[in-house]
Amino acid sequence: MASTSDPRGGGDVPAASGIMTTSASMLCSENQSLIIEMRKVFNMMKEIAVDLERENESAKVNELENTVAELLATYEDCTYQTSAIESVGNTYHPGAELTDFKKLLNDEFMKFKGNKSSAPQNHPIMRQFREAIWNVHHSGQPMPGEEQEDIVMTNNQSTILNITCPLSGKPITELAEPVRGVDCMHVYEKKAIMGYISRNAQAKCPITGCPRFLRQDKVVSDPLLLVEIEEMRSMSKENMTATLVEDFTMTDDEEEED
C-alpha cells in the first residue's frame, strides 16, 4: 500500500497526516478489543486448569499449558502490531515519494518485537498460569527452580507498573476512575491527575524517577487497563486464599504437636 498524497502536486499535508492519525486510532482500538478478549481467554484457561489440577488431570493441564504458550505468541504479535500502528500514526508525514506503508509498519513491528523476550515461559501471563496450578497442591512453596523470594516477585508480577496512585495514595484496585499515561504507562486516579496537570504548566509524572511529562490528552482510560486491574484483584484474592490455607495448615500441625 502506498500513499496517494503528493506534496509536489499540491496535496494537503496536514489533512493527510490527520487522516492517518484517525485511521491508526481506529485500527488500534480494534486491536485493543482483540487483546482484551484474549486476556479474558487466558484467565478462563487458568481457571479451567486449576480445576483440572484439583482433579489430578495432569495430562489435560499440560495440554492447556501448551495451548497458552501458543496463544501467547499470537497475543504478543498483536500487541506489537498495535504499538507499530500507533507509532506510525503519530509520526507519519507525507514526503516527496510515495510511502510504502507495508514496509513502514513491518519495520516498526520488528523494532518493538526486537526489544522483547520471545520465550513464553518468561511471560508474566505464563508465570501466573503456572503458579496458579502449582498452588493447588503446593501453596506457599516455591516452584521448582525458584527461590523463596521469587514467590513475592511472581505474586506481584503484573503489566501495571505502579500499585498505588502517587497523588491520592489509593491502591490501583480501589481507584474510582483509573487512567494511564500513554507515554510512561503509569496509572493514576483521574480526578487527581487531571487537577495536577491543570495546576502545572510542565506536569512531570509524579512517580519518583519517571522523566516523562504529562498532558491531559495523553492520560486515558483504555479498556485494557480495566481488565488488568480486575486481574490484579483476582491475583490478590488468590494470594489471600493461599495464605489462609497455609495458616490453617500450620495451626493443625501445631495442634498435633501439642
Image: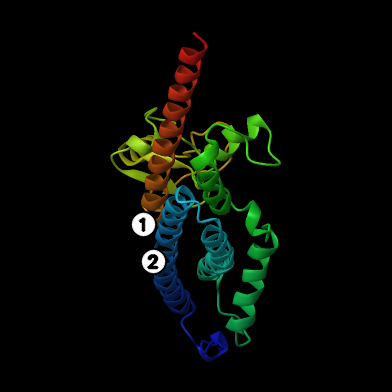
Q: Residue at x 63, y 59 (%)?
A: 120
- Reading the image, the residue beneath label 1 is 223
Q: Residue at x 50, y 45 (%)?
A: 132
Q: Give the SS element for disc 2.
A: helix
Looking at this view, name the residue that lies furthest to the left: 176
Q: Residue at x 55, y 56 (%)?
A: 58
- Reading the image, the residue beneath label 2 is 33
Tell me: residue 89, above or below residue 163: below
Name the residue nearer the viewer: 55 or 130: 55
Crowding at dot 2, Cα within 10 Å, few <14 / some 14-19 / many 20+, comes out as few
**Label 1 with label 2: CB-CB less than 8 Å:** yes
Question: Is residue 98 shown to the viewer in this render?
Answer: yes
On the image, the x and y values in percent for residue 42 come to: 46, 58
Tell me the quarter of the image containing the N terminus: bottom right
In the image, 165: left or right of 113?
A: left
Gap between marks 1 and 2 measured at Cα:
8 Å
Snapshot colouring? rainbow
Crowding at dot 1, Cα within 10 Å, few <14 / some 14-19 / many 20+, comes out as some
On the image, the x and y values in percent for residue 119 come to: 68, 59
First in sequence, mark 1 or 2: give its number.
2
Question: Is residue 220 shown to the viewer in this render?
Answer: no
Indicate the amino acid at tag 1. Answer: Pro
Indicate the amino acid at tag 2. Answer: Ser
Residue 157 lies in quadrant: top right
